Image (cartoon, rainbow, N blue to C red):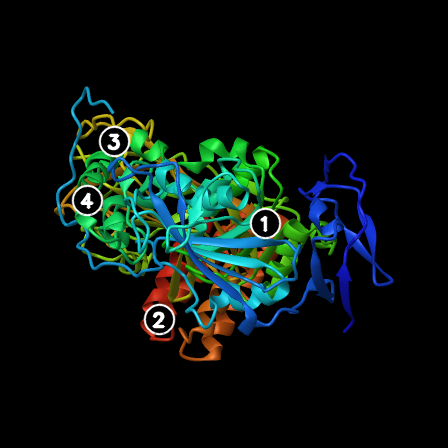
Amino acid sequence: MKKISYLVVLSVLFLSMFTGGNGFNVIERSTVSASGNEIALNGLIPETASDSAKIELENGMTSPIYAAEDVIIENLFVETEVDSDGDGELDVVSIEVMRPNTEPGIKIPVIYEMSPYRAGINSINFHDVDIDLTPVGKNHQAIPYAYETQRQNLGRLGNYYVPRGYGVILGESIGSGDATGCPTTGDEKEILGTKAVIDWLNGNAKAFNEEGEEVSADWSTGNVGMTGASYNGTLPNGVATTGVEGLKTIIPVVAISSWYDYYRANGAVVAPGGYQGEDADNLAEAVLTRENPEVCEDVIAELYEGQDRTTGDYNDFWAARDYLKNVDKIEASVLVVHGLNDWNVKTMQFAQWWEALGDHDVTRKMWLHQGGHGGTSANNWQETENRWFDYWLYGIENGIADEPMIDIQREDGSWDQEADWPAVDMKEVSLHFNEANDGEGGILTINDNAGNGEEVFSDDPMIRANQLAADPQLNNPNRLAYVSPALTEDVRLSGIPEVKIEASIDRPAANLTALLVDYSGTSPKIITRGWMDPQNRNSVEQSEAVVPGEVYTFEWDMQPKDYVFEAGHQIGVVIMASDYEYTIRPPEGTNITVLPGNSKITLPLVANTEAMKISAASLEKLVGQFDNENAFLDEEAVRALQLHLKAVGQYENQGEAEKVVRHMNGFQLLLDYQLNEKLISREAYDSMNIQAETMINEWD
């Protein structure tokens, strides 16, 4: 491995920027001489092309040249421009500065993480969710878990980046630790408090040491990259929307883009996964670790009132915590990192952020991994993070701008690179609900359902979603289930599913929940879910009264997902009311009547839609899936069904409807025989019999 040590002494001529096809702002690349070697620069950071920069490269990345034991550590207080506790004095935030002991005149960029969690969290009581829902009048007006590596020596960022020529700053947000002020759960005060550190690095704010002496950041270039996970990653999103001078890039990991969508969904009060009953006021109470916390009682009370757990409407309180509306002010590049299975900071947060960044031509890149609420160490993540900071903070031309925008981890742990997300070849496909027959489970079909029947289910909030997703072939009084034919090919979901139902409700207030399920023989897996308050059927900003018994159209989105349904599996939709783990849990008994003929789910798919149609081939796949789960007594029973279906397939291909129907009737008789002789499980029998009946109806 070749190391290149250089003290850059030449200037670089910069040319105007233009937007490249990969989403990066591209500048004509330049080179500088360094100890006889040519070092490529991207033209973004003029300081690197001066005598104030000293770094070494190894394999194109900054490498450790400064001793960790020689690091300079300063504990400082930065004056903000806000007075969140109303004491008449500007808040200060507490920071720990770690930087290498450089030669005189050398200036370095900074990697910065602000956190409300650094001093720990308080034990708090969440809101009671086992309460009745509140109907509005007819004229109504309208703790995320912190993913942090445990600190060792200088902490993860300090241990890695300080020896490589970066300063690292770890901050305590307003109202936490040694900071003053009050936590305000993501609003402008909290964002400006975080921004103050960047202002100080650029000479636009004051900082003081523990003796009260003013301290300057004359060792810094003023170029800053922010990062962090969860709340610590959310603050960079907010600061970026201020367009603050000096912020060159952010790496938000499992971060929030809109606090409304963290605690609400389409008007419904919804908890972050694992923290049922938490809301914005609880989170502020948890991170209120400053001295004399009682000074923040009024602030906490304002949070309680503003969040409005009664209606769940989007209001001024939530608008003040919505970073999407100010994306047009972002000047920094953004590397988004999110877990596709994160049910705390849910996937809507990255999806809507990614779309907004693209709409406003913000330079962006994204990593999506198969984990939950946290970052990833897979696929050489540390190297990517290093190269990203090198590119934007030192201006090193290392090729990262030439890579595809998306790195996505698949279910088997492998990684793909793609041009954009959702997948560029994604198309929306609607699957229509078909009502159950004789108490059996319902069907999802590509073709419209002209039926005019209705189905009823009753809310029981104490039954968990995984229980309601089980046995879709059976009638269940507390949910409706609709299942596709077995897929004859893999089908990829990439984007935001949307549900539309026509229904009436026998009470003026209720919850609505939809589950998207991967059915694999006897093993259901909930892939994603979504919620709504029926009173917000027309707008999240305005609840409207629900008249019991009146039929309405309800449409709501589910959490975004990228997932592959394998051949042989079935796509299922479960419609229920309250969701034990996420929504308010009102008294049981609300009855919801659904009109399946006017109801559907629209899925963003990369798929051959023929693979989703009922056919002899799909039934063969279903037989194989149940065989894999030992649903048959012996292979002879499996072979008998498969041979029968192969014959049906031949008639299908020839378009001989009469023979298809006759032989499918024979297939049902064979299923009856196998059930009576105990050659097949009841679940496999029910599932295949429903699909067989559907196929007969289509050909008859």
Question: How far is disc 2 from disc 1 in space, using C-alphas?
Answer: 31 Å
What whole-number distance in Å separates the C-alpha atoms at marks 4 and 1?
57 Å
In x, y percent, where is residue 640? 49, 71
Nearer the observer, 216 or 244? 216
Residue located at (36% from left, 32% from top): 319
The three-letter amino acid code for the residue at tag 1 is Ala
Amino acid type at mark 2: Ser
Say whether marks 3 and 1 touch (CB < 8 Å): no
Numbered badge on residue 535: 3
Q: Looking at numbered disc 3 in the image, what kind of residue is underneath it?
A: Gln
Give how far apart the Cα atoms at labels 4 and 3 are.
Answer: 37 Å
The earlier-in-sequence mark between 2 and 3 is 3
Q: Which residue is mark 1?
A: 607
Secondary structure, mark 4, is helix
Residue carrying label 2: 681
Say whether disc 4 or disc 1 marks the residue closer to the N-terminus: 4
Q: Are marks 2 and 4 in contact (CB under 8 Å)?
A: no
Residue linked to disc 4: 295
- Tell me whether the residue at label 4 lies in contact with that at label 3, contact meaning CB atoms closer than 8 angstroms: no
Residue in view at x 70 percent, y 53 percent: 52
CA neighbours of label 3 inside 10 A, class few (<14), some (14 to 19), many (20+):
many
Q: Position of residue 578 (x, y in %)?
A: 23, 47
Would residue 23 appear left or right of 372 to someone viewing this image? right
Q: Where's residue 508, x and y in %?
A: 17, 32
Q: Amino acid at mark 4?
A: Val
Q: CA distance from mark 2 to mark 3?
A: 43 Å
Residue at 46 percent across and 35 percent down: it is 324
Dot 1: few (<14), some (14–19), or many (≥20) neighbours within 10 Å?
Answer: some
